[in-house]
Amino acid sequence: MFSRLLVAVLLIAALIVTAGAVQAQNPADNAELVFDIPAQSLETALEAFGERSRMQVLYETTLTTGRRSSAVKGMFTREAALQQLLAGTGLELSYTGERAFTLTPIRTTARSNLIVANYDRFLGTVQAAVLSALCQNPETKPGAFRLAMQFWVATSGRIENPHLLSSTGANRRDAIIIDVVQRLAFGQAPPSGMPQPITIVLRAGPEGSHGGCENTRP
């Protein structure tokens, strides 16, 4: 069949994760922003939306394949802009944090809701753990660089075979990131049938940004 924070579309059968809080909630900032995003491939439209809104996205990569966004031009809240962008794609959004959301197919049955929610909970745990670990080291603290990485989560809950899809721009930092991530383990196995590998993408922020680390605890 995990984000181009953590947002990106890279490989089939991958999931994109973006940084953010684990618990679902509406974004705190509902101020209107000026958007000018032409209709285009959904992947690139989501990147443009993330850059403008400073929000992060989590979704299965196959959801965007072959889909095109609707144009978004004018003054919108972040939520209204994203809903406009997704119009006609068959996808909907739900929030995983103040500045993070997931994309899922429009749900038609209680069973599909349950399956997606199960994935969302686990992926929220993964993204929070990875972000927290990276935030503890000044050299890997997100915000100053873009990171694209893939890994698997074994049934033991341990991260396996983490590897960068592209360099962060510093070989030493690349190596430290791999070392930090491969030490992570979760107290649960991934949900049965969840697509893997997981792809996590951290986008570079403006100078002086914290990359989401202000919302993490040591």
Image (cartoon, rainbow, N blue to C red):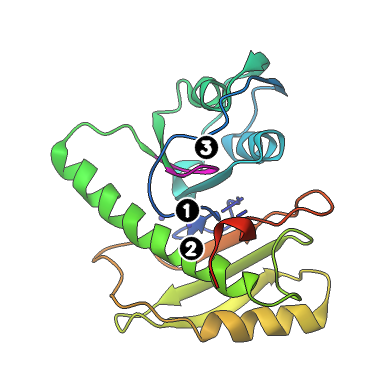
Q: Nearer the viewer, mark 3 or mark 2?
A: 2
Observer-nearest of 171 and 105 = 171
Which secondary structure dominates the residues rendered in magenta?
Answer: strand
Q: Mark 3 near mark 1, Cβ–Cβ under 8 Å?
A: no
**SS type, badge 3:** loop
**SS type, badge 2:** helix
Dot 1 crowding, Cα within 10 Å, few <14, some 14–19, many 20+: many
Marks 3 and 2, the one that precedes in the sequence: 3
Q: Amino acid at mark 3?
A: Gly
Q: Quadrant of residue 189?
A: bottom left
Q: Which of the image's four quarters has the N terminus?
A: bottom left
Residue farthest along the top direction in this orientation? 74
Dot 3 crowding, Cα within 10 Å, few <14, some 14–19, many 20+: few
The residue beneath circle 1 is 21
Return the x and y of residue 40 as percentages of the image width and height: 65, 28
Q: Left of 55 or right of it: where is 64?
A: left
Q: Left of 141 or right of it: where is 25?
A: left
Q: Left of 121 or right of it: where is 20?
A: right
**SS type, badge 1:** loop
Write the start and end of the magenta stretch as one range. Answer: 96-103
The residue beneath circle 2 is 128
Return the x and y of residue 77 as percentages of the image width and height: 58, 21
Q: Amino acid at mark 2?
A: Ala
Q: Which of the image's four quarters has the C terminus?
A: bottom right
Which residue corresponds to the image point at 20% horizontal and 47% vertical from the top-left? 114
Which residue corresponds to the image point at 53% horizontal and 84% vertical from the top-left? 182
